[in-house]
Amino acid sequence: VFLSGMAVGLFLFPHNFAALSRLAVRSSPLVSMATETSSCDYLVVGAGASGMSFVDTLLLHAPEPVSVTLLDKREQPGGHWNDAYDYVTLHQPARNYGVESTALEAFTQHPEKLASRDEILDYYRSLLSRWGEAGHRVSFVGGAAYDFGSASYVDASGSRVGVDASKVVDARYTENDLPLLVPPKFSVGDGVDLIPPNQLPARGAGEGRRYCVLGGGKTGQDAVLFLRQTLGVPLDRIAWVVPHLPWITARDPPSPLRQNTCIEFIASALEAHAAAGSPPSALSSSAFLQSAFAKLEEEGKVYRLLPNETPTKFMDATLNRREAELLRESAPSVIHGRGRVASLSSTGDLVFADGSELALPWANEGGRSAAELTTYVHCTAGAFNFGASAAEGRRPVFSSEGEITVQELFQFPGFCFNGAVVAWLECQRGLSLAQKNALCELPPPPEEGEAPPLGPVAGQVGPLSAGHPLLVSLRNLRRWYATPGMGEWLHGLRLFSLAMNGYSLAEGRALVEKNCAGLVEAGLLTPPEEGR
């Protein structure tokens, strides 16, 4: 397929055809007769962070022993970590990641407890053994994509296996979009060398090679840091396209083992709003949330990339001061304020969504085009766009058909925590289906309409409406505290960020109530909303 003489980026990534299969797992036009059938209490589809956390908490808290079949299209558990670039590390403390029963920090040698890709995969593999040693009945099936329509999967031998499960858990609903698997939305001219970040280590810095990194999120930040620190590429041979400047979470003192949570962030916003005289105009714009970031910046808890530019995006990318300073040194290489790239021309020029064009600084150097001199690095997948599930529509966490869908109930940090929360609720036999779903408010779905041609933009800092994920998180936590036994469990859970930050149950409840009262006073919640 070609668009205006340009090959769509997918065809520069032959392995990206795997991405297409992600869109087909909910249903199949062909329901084949299974050649064999297996049975279990729970079939968990997806062995990534959410699925592994769900299984672990289910095994710990189920009122009676259960059998679990854990199925993933990858050959081993660990989800997107199997597809991540080799130089990636966890960018939050390991003590807040993984599963309820087992500390990830015991598996890492990093001084800041930032587990590497291999350490995380080893951790998840070890859980399968630990569960078996504890007497739990868990079977893992790798290399198989589950077909929800036929309740079956095709195993490594090519046989179709039916699964008779009492309940099916869809734990791949929040599967990250990675450049390795998700092609760029922009078109790419013939002969342009475009790679996912996974291929950077093999390229090196030799022969005067130039690099253009596309994307300003954590993947783009990691790519620039790898080019500078590991490959030693000089700054004048790097261009970095950052459509939206990000706020960056600090990993340094004054709080080296704390990560600012969504509940604490709301408190910071309310304090900053009050200190500014509670201007009503701030409530209908980004000013309310931006005031919180300004306060956190004064406290040394967030960084900005460019000193005189206010960031407009936040996805909780986390760096230490040294890394942030190195990225700031890259300021002369940063291309921002022009929006997103719509295409790379055959000569290597950047063509933006507004139709404007920009030649890279070294274009035509020595009579060679930018395309001949440059490797372009695709970091624009948008990890939290959740492309696979976005095509499927929103559904309740607990369905009457016996399906459980692990979704985002609580904001940063959340993936592992959300899996554990859904599993804990599943184990509460005294709660009805309606009561469980009432404890799982979801952010409202995106407004209907034509999708942006370059895909959605997540994490924009805008007004704080009643349906904002921050307030959904706050309301969910207030409900959880009101649920018998749940607050006690949360504050004993290694994955719960307030517990990690040293809050007692009483202190957590007090902070939530203070936030709710402040938001009602500010006019951001009405009393009925506050009590929902």
Image: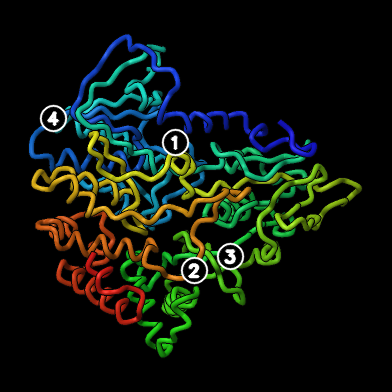
Q: Label 4: how many residues lie within 10 Å, few (<14), some (14-19) or many (20+)? A: few
Q: Which residue is mark 1?
A: 82
Nearer to the camera, 263 or 196: 263
The residue that label 4 is drawn on is: 135
Q: Earlier in the sequence, mark 2 or mark 1?
A: 1
Residue 39 quadrant: top left
Q: Give how far across and how far down residue 324 sits, in percent.
A: 53, 65
Distance from the alpha carbon under mark 4 to that under mark 1: 27 Å
Q: Quadrant of the N terminus?
A: top right
Q: Residue beneath label 3, please?
A: 245
Residue 242 is left or right of residue 398, and the answer is: right
Question: Residue 397 placed where, x, y %?
Answer: 28, 45
If the image is split into quadrants, where does the C terminus sit? Answer: bottom left
Mark 3 or 4: in front is 3
Residue type marked 4: Gly
**Marks 2, 4: nearer the viewer:** 2
Who's the residue at 32% across and 57% down the image? 410
Residue 38 occupies which quadrant of the picture?
top left
**Type of amino acid at the residue the image marks with label 2:** Gly
Please tell me whether residue 269 is drawn above or below residue 219 in the rendered image: below
Q: Secondary structure at mark 2?
A: loop
3D distance between C-alphas at marks 2 and 4: 49 Å
Measured Cα–Cα span from mark 3 to mark 4: 50 Å
Of the image marks 1 and 3, the number of the one nearer the N terminus: 1
Q: CA distance from mark 3 to mark 2?
A: 14 Å
Secondary structure of the residue carrying numbered label 1 = helix
**Residue at the extreme bottom of the image, as rendered:** 277
Residue 508, percent from left and from top: 21, 69
Q: Where is mark 2, residue-wise? A: 462
- Is any part of residue 256 visible from this angle? no
